[in-house]
């Protein structure tokens, strides 16, 4: 059994005043009831009634803090009054009624009805002890009624309060959940922007750096080819500016239809991507197996960025001038493999190292794919990505499991 109390700041003093006034009102009503019933409408009351009713009503001031104690006092005073021959009626036992209501409003249902039943038994027992012939009297029936009524009202009030509290808690929980979801969306958007900026900037800066190195080398040995290298730097830097402009414009748009968007790079842009690496001094040998199938827009972008980042890592870290790109179209999966014959050991760390592999894994994970990377047993490095095709269906999933290739590479370590 638990007594539930609700305290609100600044309300205790007001509650105490209300309880004092209510106790005084109950005392006056009880005195009036006793005088009418027992003194034949004359305002003369026996001192025993004044003392007992005053005690039970005065105790009501503490009914919120000690509901069971106050109820015990009220029952005792009422039982003594009945033993002395008083017949108070509902009005004269207002302190008992109010005490039962208080108990019902702050405890559970089982305790409420147990208390109400015990109260009725005590009061009816006191009446029978005074006059056993009143067993079936209307007064005893009335006692049962006015002990059940405040119990029912108090139980309803308690249930209503519990319902309101539950609704408020659900609303607060929903608000906290919305705030948490908003924070998660912001974090996810930040990660997406970080991946996009990393892929765009790292790729183009790596190509610019490579072509600038070629230009420096050609100035002395083959000056007639310097212009070609500088034109390559110009084209790559312009491409970087264009992609950054698209990314920044998307961030500034208040909604998705606020401004036209340039086409998002995808698998159809891979030939241009390979050509840019060719101009930077990295020849990419591409092989294709299976019939090309479309990917969802998000997976299409992820495939392009994974190829871009993997080849950028080859250009930055391997020290070789050739790489291999294999595209394998299975019934439900596109497998992308980028390999080189450079050193198997990871390149020396540089600021930001590792973000490329993390970004590739995150991109693949967001579209239901996966990426693994690591050194090859025969030397070099490999990156393998598996992405779902747009034509994949639930019926094909079981067959796709058998078609899933073993991912090359033993560890996920190495290049940025």
Image (cartoon, rainbow, N blue to C red):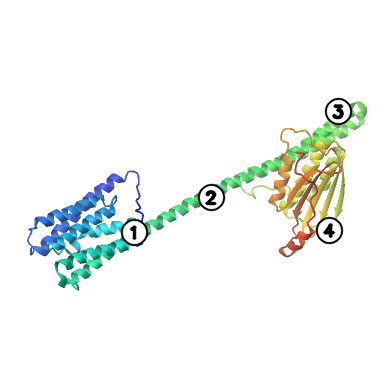
Dot 1: what SS?
Answer: helix
Q: Residue sitting at 32 percent across and 63 percent down?
A: 113
Q: Say whether disc 2 or disc 1 marks the residue closer to the N-terminus.
A: 1
Q: Secondary structure at mark 2?
A: helix
Instruction: Measure the C-alpha gap from mark 3 to mark 2.
Output: 56 Å
Q: Are marks 3 and 4 in contact (CB under 8 Å)?
A: no
Choose mark 2 or mark 1, whichever is in front.
1
Callout 1 crowding tier (Cα within 10 Å): few <14, some 14–19, many ≥20: some
Alpha-carbon span between mark 3 and mark 4? 43 Å
Mark 1 or mark 3, which is nearer to you? 1
- Quadrant of the frame with the C terminus: top right
Q: Is residue 234 visible?
A: no
Q: Which residue has dot 4 on it?
A: 291
Q: Which residue is mark 3?
A: 216
In the image, residue 190 lies at what x, y percent? 64, 42
Q: Quadrant of the N terminus?
A: bottom left
Where is residue 9? Give x, y as percent. Answer: 35, 44
* Cα distance in 3D space between marks 2 and 4: 44 Å
Q: Is residue 167 visible?
A: yes
Residue bearing mark 1: 157
Which of disc 2 and disc 3 is earlier in sequence? 2
Q: Are the residues flagged by discs 1 and 3 in contact, CB closer than 8 Å?
A: no
**Label 3 neighbourhood size at 10 Å, few (<14), some (14-19), many (20+)?**
some
Determine the residue positioned at 86% across, 32% down: 214
Spot occupied by residue 192 in the image (x, y as percentages of width and height): 67, 45
12 sits left or right of 31 in the view: right
């Amino acid at each position: 059994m638990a007594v539930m109390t609700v305290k609100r700041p600044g309300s205790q003093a007001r509650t105490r005043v209300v309880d004092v006034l209510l106790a005084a009102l109950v005392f006056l009503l009880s005195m009036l009831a006793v005088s009418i019933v027992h003194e034949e409408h004359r305002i003369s009351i026996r001192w025993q009634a004044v003392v007992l009713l005053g005690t039970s009503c005065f105790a009501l001031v503490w009914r919120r803090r000690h509901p069971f104690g106050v109820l015990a006092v009220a029952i005792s005073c009422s039982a003594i009054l009945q033993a002395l021959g008083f017949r108070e009626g509902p009005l004269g036992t207002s302190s008992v009624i109010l005490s039962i209501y208080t108990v019902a409003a702050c405890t559970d249902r089982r305790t409420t009805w147990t208390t109400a039943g015990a109260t009725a038994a005590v009061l009816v027992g006191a009446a029978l002890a005074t006059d056993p012939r009143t067993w079936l009297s209307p007064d005893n029936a009335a006692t049962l009624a006015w002990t059940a009524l405040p119990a029912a009202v108090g139980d309803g009030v308690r249930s209503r309060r519990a319902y309101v509290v539950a609704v408020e808690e659900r609303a607060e929980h929903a608000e906290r959940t919305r705030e948490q979801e908003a924070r998660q969306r912001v974090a996810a958007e930040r990660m997406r922007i970080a991946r996009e900026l990393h892929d765009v900037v790292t790729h183009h800066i790596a190509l610019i750096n490579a072509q600038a190195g070629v230009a420096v080398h050609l100035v002395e040995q083959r000056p007639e080819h310097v212009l070609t290298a500088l034109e390559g730097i110009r084209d790559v830097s312009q491409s970087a500016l264009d992609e950054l402009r698209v990314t920044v414009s998307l961030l500034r748009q208040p909604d998705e239809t606020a401004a036209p968007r340039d086409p998002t790079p995808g698998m159809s842009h891979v030939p241009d991507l390979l050509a840019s690496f060719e101009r930077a001094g990295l020849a990419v040998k591409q092989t294709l197996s299976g019939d090309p199938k479309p990917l969802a827009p998000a997976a299409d972008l992820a495939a392009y960025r994974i190829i871009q980042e993997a080849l950028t890592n080859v250009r930055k870290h391997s020290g070789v001038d050739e790489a291999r790109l294999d595209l394998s179209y299975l019934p439900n999966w596109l497998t992308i493999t980028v390999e080189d014959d450079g050193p198997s050991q990871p390149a020396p760390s540089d600021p930001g190292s590792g973000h490329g592999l993390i970004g590739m894994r995150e991109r693949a994970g967001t579209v239901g794919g996966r990426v693994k990377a690591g050194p090859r047993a025969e030397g070099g490095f490999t990156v393998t990505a598996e992405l779902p095709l747009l034509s994949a269906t639930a019926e094909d999933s079981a067959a796709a499991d058998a078609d899933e290739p073993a991912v090359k590479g033993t560890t996920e370590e190495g290049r940025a």
